[in-house]
Image (cartoon, rainbow, N blue to C red):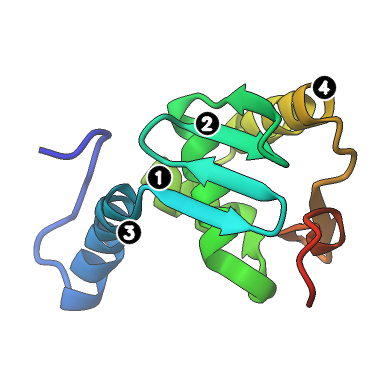
Amino acid sequence: MPKGNIYLKRPFRIVELIEVLQPIFERMKSKRENKRVLGYISFIISDRKLIYKDKKAVLLTEKESDIFVSLLNSEDRGITKEEVMSKVWMLNPNIETHTFETHLYRLRKKIKEGLILNDFIINKGGRFYLNHELTGEKN
C-alpha cells in the first residue's frame, strides 16, 4: 500500500486513476534507478543523499527527496507548486496550504549551507527549476 492518503470519488474516470498512480510509478522508477547525475551534482535516491563535486553532501528528508526528484524529472519545463502538491503529497492542487513553501525553504537552506550553492532551485513565472548554470552541466 502506498504512503499517503489517496482518495477517488466513485464513480471515477480512468484519467483520475492515472493521475493518482503516476506519482507512485515515478517513485518506483526513481528507486530502481538509484542514482541521478546532473553535472557536478549526484543524487543517491535510496540514501536521499545529495552530493556536490563528490565532496560535499547533504541528507534530505523523504519529502525533500521527492521534491528534488520531481525537479529532476521536470527537466527544462519546470514544475509548478500544484504539480508538486499532487505528485508528492497526493493532495488536491487547489488546497490552500504552505506545506510546499516550507519544505522548499528547508531544501534550499540545506543546499545553500551544506553544498554552498546559492539559488540552486529557482522560480521563473510560477515554475520551479534546477539552476543548470551551477551544476557544471552544459545546456
Which label is found at residue 49? 2
Instruction: Give the CA separation, mark 3 to mark 4.
Output: 29 Å
Percent across and percent down for residue 60 are 54, 27
Residue 22 sits above or below residue 92 on the image: below
Percent across and percent down for residue 78 are 67, 67
Which label is found at residue 26? 3
Q: Quadrant of residue 105?
A: top right
Residue drawn where x is 10% and y is 59% of the image: 10
Which mark is nearer the camera, 3 or 4? 4
Which mark is nearer the camera, 2 or 1? 2
- Nearest to N terminus: mark 2 or mark 4: 2
**Residue pointed to by mark 1:** 91
The C terminus is located in which quarter?
bottom right
- Nearest to N terminus: mark 3 or mark 4: 3
Residue drawn where x is 70% and y is 59% of the image: 39
SS for dot 4 = helix
Kind of residue indicated by mark 2: Lys
